[in-house]
Amino acid sequence: MPFGVGRVRVTGAIVAVLLALAGTPAPAAATLLADQPYRIGFQGRLVTDVMIDGKGPFAFVIDTASSRSLMFEHVRAALGLTQSQPQPITIYGINDVGQAMPVAPGEVSVAGETVHGLVMGVLPDEGPGGPDGILGVDVLSRYFVVLDRTAMRFKLLSSDSGAEQDYSGWTHATLTPRPLRNFPIQFWYLDTRFNDVGFHSLFDLGASVTMMNWHAAEKLGVHQRDFKSFGPPPDQLRDVLGKDAPAVKLLGLEARMSSRIWGDQLVLVANAPVFNYFDLDERPAAIVGLGLLGQNSLAIDFAGHKLYVGPTLGEDGKEKGS
């Protein structure tokens, strides 16, 4: 039964974690290297087309919290690629940490912008109708990335072309790179406030639901001890939500990033394994992506450590302002 905790409404419903998305408008004078459509598919994920060794197009998910770009087994087989080095590579992503076969295609292209020498991981197929691969931060962080939510265009600009000037009128927040504790792998974090309480937040355009751990929920006055009767999450969700702690939804939160405010937000609370993977299990932490930013145009300046948050797309398909 729902009840009030300050400005937060809590229910015991458990939410399956979906994957996916974000968006933004175009540059004026900066060097545009690639410009093509993106779309929403595969359970709400951001998807764009990728060519590999001149073959494709393949449907790749755009994911700022995947440590490497990946292809699924059916793509590897179609391309005839073989293992490129003796040891498997470790893959960090929102749902899991695992080992993958390394392959080294000659070139990977997005709208004609080509990356050479990219070592990709190969994962088992998700099943019929799944994506062909994942475009991770090993590619994305080389560029100034724009997601135009209104026009549904995915743009790659030169990271040193002054592109940030075209988005200076948008709300901007600091993107902080942070390596994992025991591995030379870097991810990106945002300072985000929920009900005016600040948390270290992983920037993850592969996550369609905003999530926080129980350390963060306690800061908001929502206490894990009050939900012990719920027991652990169902078996089918434990790989995502954890095996022990309860998982609950918080409704009606206010989220703030720099000067931008989003009201009436839904946040999933769970001590999910992902917090362990990203060394966030011992501090209040959140994961923000589509659940917060999905209706906004975005410009991601990896080199300048800034996220620019642009116009919001309203229910009528028109921009609500920046």
Image (cartoon, helix red, strand yellow):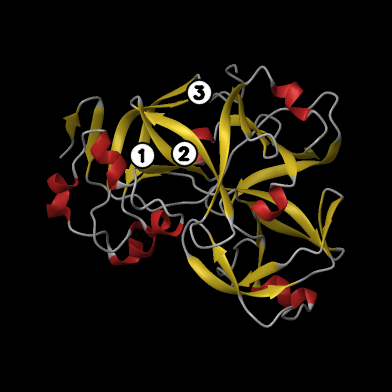
| N-term mark: 2 or 3 | 3
| Residue density around tag 3, few if under 14, some if 14–19, many if 20 or more, within 10 Å | some
172 or 2, which lies in front?
Answer: 172
Q: Residue 141 placed where, x, y %?
A: 69, 46
* Tag 1–tag 2 contact (CB < 8 Å): yes
Image quarter of residue 103: bottom right
Instruction: Identify the element where label 1 is drawn.
Output: strand
Disc 2 to disc 3, C-alpha distance: 17 Å
Instruction: Identify the element where label 3 is drawn.
Output: loop
Q: Which residue is mark 1?
A: 267
**In this picture, residue 126 sits left or right of residue 166:** left
The residue under the point 57% across, 23% down is 316
Amino acid type, label 2: Gly
The residue under the point 51% across, 51% down is 19
Q: Is residue 26 visible?
A: no
| Residue density around tag 1, few if under 14, some if 14–19, many if 20 or more, within 10 Å | many
| N-term mark: 1 or 2 | 1
Image quarter of residue 74: bottom right
Q: Quadrant of the N terminus?
A: top left
The residue under the point 59% across, 63% down is 130
The vertical placement of 184 against 45, above or below, is below
Instruction: Identify the element where label 2 is drawn.
Output: helix
Disc 3 to disc 1, C-alpha distance: 19 Å
Amino acid type, label 1: Val
Q: Which residue is mark 2?
A: 291
